[in-house]
Amino acid sequence: MDQKPRMMSRVAMWVVGGIVLLLAGAVPASADNGPHVKGAGLVADTCAACHRAHTAQAPMLLKESQEQLCFTCHGSGAGGASTDVEDGVGYSSTARTGAAKALRGGGFKFALIGSNNPSGNGYIGEIPVRATGAAATSSHSIDESDQMAWGNGAVSGTASYGTVMPLRCGSCHDPHGNGNYRILRPIPDESDAETGITIADASTKTYTTENYWLVEDESAPGFIANVSSWCATCHTRYLAGGGSGHTSSGDAVFAYRHRTNQTSQGTPTCVQCHVAHGSNANMGTYSTGVPDPEGGTVGSDSRLLRIDNRGVCQMCHNK
């Protein structure tokens, strides 16, 4: 029997199949989508978009530094993702057409948080969205420089302020996808936590907001219930329950602590007061003089807070 026709047929199928994979791989990047999907398997172009086998310029065989690589899609001049985490804005599509809306997590270089104009208190409070972005006055580090993770470590009678960590985007997010909320790693890369915190993914992904005081994600009921514990995988001693403001933890530095373990909108959680990426809040005369845990002056650093002059306190403790 002549094998040539059969072999030619197989070759044609391989060629067509390869073209299909190439086209499938050329998809725009969007958090929890695009190339960041758990179990996507081997799809042409996805590896090459980020890695180089023999000519890599950064650890983990990345073709450039992780910050710049992530900004290739999620930066201000990019077009591969609907989320621009550099400017703190999001769009309705990866084409970035239509109006830019405010990202829930703020932005690393700019943010649209109406930090100077809050109103209400508790659950019904409002922090509006700015018409244009303002420069970030604080942000989580993503450039791999050494930064202090305040409160990291066990409660101790010996003064200890935290641990220096070289944070990057991949410290918190899994670029290959893991099926979790915002592809968050159960244990961030630099954390020495023994138990991870898994937050289930949202059924419908909403990256933008019109009110920075409303932090609950209704499509992910477990988010606000678990996010403080997730933050505490690095900021260990910041997680505190009821009565912690009146009872000492026994720690030499973080002795009396505000409660952070509540589970609903408008109650004390890490994200009720702070954004994840960066804030544009400003600090005035008194709020710039607040000392950091080590005794240095915080200055104009807004510590990722949502309101000017550390005004998140007054949203609940209205004087």
Image (cartoon, rainbow, N blue to C red):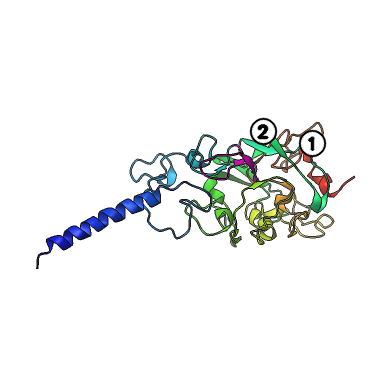
Residue farthest to the front, as pictured: 98
Q: Is residue 89 magenta?
A: yes
Query: Closer to the N terminus: mark 1 or mark 2?
Result: 2
Q: Please tell me which residue is depicted at 53% across the width and 53% down the height of the picture.
A: 32
Task: State which mark lies toward you, 1 or 2.
Answer: 2
How far apart, in angstroms, are the residues tagged by discs 1 and 2? 25 Å
Residue 300 figure quarter? top right
- The stretch in magenta equals 87-107
Residue farthest to the right, as pictured: 319
Residue 97 figure quarter? top right
Residue with the mark numbered 2: 132
Q: Is residue 66 magenta?
A: no
Q: Please tell me which residue is depicted at 43% across the width and 41% down the height of the picture.
A: 58
In the image: residue 35, left or right of residue 128: left
Residue farthest to the bottom, as pictured: 1
Residue with the mark numbered 1: 287
Pointer 2: residues within 10 angstroms few (<14), some, or many (20+)? Answer: some
| Number of the label disc, if any, that sits on residue 308 | none
Query: Magenta residues: mostly which secondary structure?
Result: loop
Q: Position of residue 170 (x, y in %)?
A: 52, 48
The amino acid beneath tag 1 is Ser
Asked if disc 1 and disc 2 are in contact, CB closer than 8 Å, the reply is no
Q: Position of residue 191 (x, y in %)?
A: 58, 53
The correct choice, above or below, for 134 with respect to 38 in the image is above
Tell me if I can see residue 66 in this picture.
no
Near-viewer residue (32 or 280): 32
In the image: residue 24, left or right of residue 95: left
Near-viewer residue (30 or 242): 30
